[in-house]
Image (tube, rainbow, N blue to C red):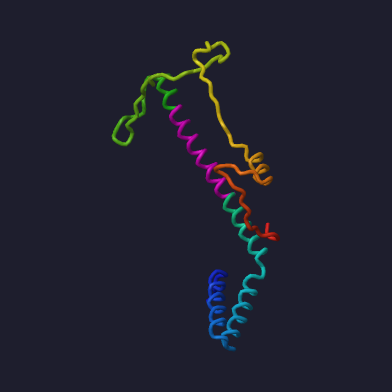
Amino acid sequence: MSKSLVSITRDLLVAKQDAEIFNDEDAMKRVDEICAERYRKANGMQYLHGEIDGEINLFTSQLNKLKSYIKFLKNSQERLKNYVISQYNETGELPSHDVFNPIQIKKSSGAVDVIDEVVIPMEYFIQVKTMKLDKKKLLADLKEGKEIPGARLAKRDYVKGIK
């Protein structure tokens, strides 16, 4: 059975502790075997990363197609509703009404239809003010050593060589 890199690393840590505690040849041999296994497993990480990227692209494409199809279905529903309304307005008749087809036409309570926003009086406008954190300035100040309450400079490890 193939072990994951995490499992191999866990085994390596245990084997290293055993080798430090017992200091015998078998424990050291076990560490070497696990190191070799980890090396074999780790070789090709860039390829594996690329394979995963390919799957991500494939599923993203499929997801976009599904979203597009959902949009098509919703538009179809709206066209069906508009058809029923237009036919009712032209003929005054609705499709047959029963338990499986409980269609009715109602008037809405009203909605705003803005024809020309420029001529609407100012009393109908509200002021909208938004605040946004300037992370570039924040980062620059933190890198200069400035202490800023609520923020700190985070330096994280990253892998170079894998896109």
Q: Is residue 158 above or below residue 135?
A: below
Image quarter hosting the C terminus: bottom right
Give me the residue at 38% from left, 20% from top.
109
Residue 132 is one of the magenta-drawn residues: no
Residue furthest right in the image: 161
Q: Which residues are magenta?
A: 61-82
Looking at the rendering, which quadrant does residue 33 occupy? bottom right
Give me the residue at 48% from left, 35% from top.
76
Q: Is residue 154 left or right of residue 91?
A: right
Q: Is residue 109 left or right of residue 48?
A: left
Q: Is residue 36 left or right of residue 79?
A: right
Q: Nearer the viewer, residue 32 or 19?
A: 19
Residue furthest left in the image: 99
Residue 18, position as x, y percentages in the image: 53, 81
Q: Is residue 56 above or below residue 20?
A: above
Give me the residue at 70% from left, 61% from top.
161
Residue 158, position as x, y percentages in the image: 65, 58
From the image, give the main secondary structure of the stretch colored magenta: helix
Q: Is residue 12 above or below residue 132?
A: below
Q: Nearer the viewer, residue 59 or 15?
A: 15
Q: Nearer the viewer, residue 152 or 61?
A: 152
How many marks overall? 0
Residue 73 is one of the magenta-drawn residues: yes
Give me the residue at 56% from left, 42% from top.
149
Q: Nearer the viewer, residue 91 or 134?
A: 134
Q: Is residue 98 above or below residue 90?
A: below
Residue 151, position as x, y percentages in the image: 57, 44
